[in-house]
Image (cartoon, grey):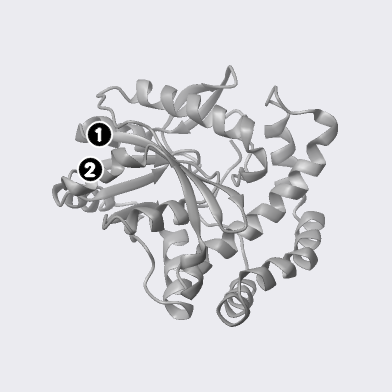
Amino acid sequence: MSKWSGRTKGFVLGYQIFIFLIKKLGVPVAYFLLYFVVPVYYVFLQKARKNLSATFKNIPQLNSSSLQIIIYRNFHNLGKTLIDNFAILTKWSDNYSYTQEGEEYLIDLIKNQKSAILISGHIGSWNIAGELLKKQKGVINVVMFDGEAKRIKKLVERNIGESNYKIISIKKDLSHLFKIKTAVDNGELICIHADRYLEGANTITAKLFNKEVQFPLGPFAIVSKLNIPYSFVFAIKESMYKYQFSATKPQLSNDPQIIANEFADILSQKLSKHPEQWFNYFNIFEKK
């Protein structure tokens, strides 16, 4: 996989403009601005286009002649998803709805104050999934890299207010592991993305579309060592205000390889159906 610094690309001023439009004029107006912004990103983000193309060529269901169309739609959907991530925290949140598959599993965990690890990837929108779970009175912790966490948290709090989840920043001194354990002891839910890793991080091998890829070992090791239920959770955009929420039945395993294999299987399914919502702009098939 291509090297990742732990920070997500994006311009704070651009985010602030979109937040202003969302708050004052609504989601459709913010979407409309994307017709002018997306072509610029498509032209200048050549590395992202190249990595998406390399990834998509390994998906058997995709026609190679249509890859650039899918990539352009992907850029456009990223913009829409970022807008939704902010809009769900504003007065427009009531406009959003979702279809669901497996939500009852997580509701049961929340009602019984049982902790679980929710494993996801950079496809669709975790923020939307987090908001849906918050409406069920669940306490959500999202584990993310420190540089990414501070930037996003500061931006949201300054322009909108409290976010819909708590952030656990990944630290070099491993202090985040104690915060995860505290959240577990409190019966809270912990979400971890498992499809990116930093250069030099320990990895685990699994098969995606029958090809070996590297995933970060950390998420799967944490689940196995804590010995608590895990579920694979995704929220896929269906229309302007509608998402498809899915969660697998919580399971237990003390073997990181089993969990990684299961994640690769479900990620393959999601990626083959929704490549235009794959927002991991690093070639996941690249050898470490």
Q: Determine the residue positioned at 70% across, 52% down.
A: 75
Percent x, y of residue 264: 49, 27
Locate the C terminus by quadrant. top right
Percent x, y of residue 186: 15, 52
Distance, label 1 to label 2, CA atoms, is: 9 Å
Locate the N terminus by quadrant. top right
In the rendered image, the vertical position of residue 223 relative to residue 71, given as above or below? above
The outermost residue toward the right is 65
Badge number at residue 109: 2
Q: Amino acid at mark 1?
A: Pro
Percent x, y of residue 286: 63, 31
Where is mark 1, residue-wise?
229
Badge number at residue 277: none
Labels 1 and 2: the sequence-earlier one: 2
Q: In terms of image quadrants, where is residue 55?
A: top right
Q: Amino acid at mark 2?
A: Leu
Q: Determine the residue positioned at 81% across, 59% down.
A: 39
Q: Is residue 171 visible?
A: no
Q: Is residue 271 visible?
A: yes
Per the image, label 1 sits on a secondary structure element best described as: loop
Per the image, label 2 sits on a secondary structure element best described as: helix
Q: Determine the residue positioned at 61% across, 40% down.
A: 2
* Labels 1 & 2 near each other (Cβ < 8 A): yes
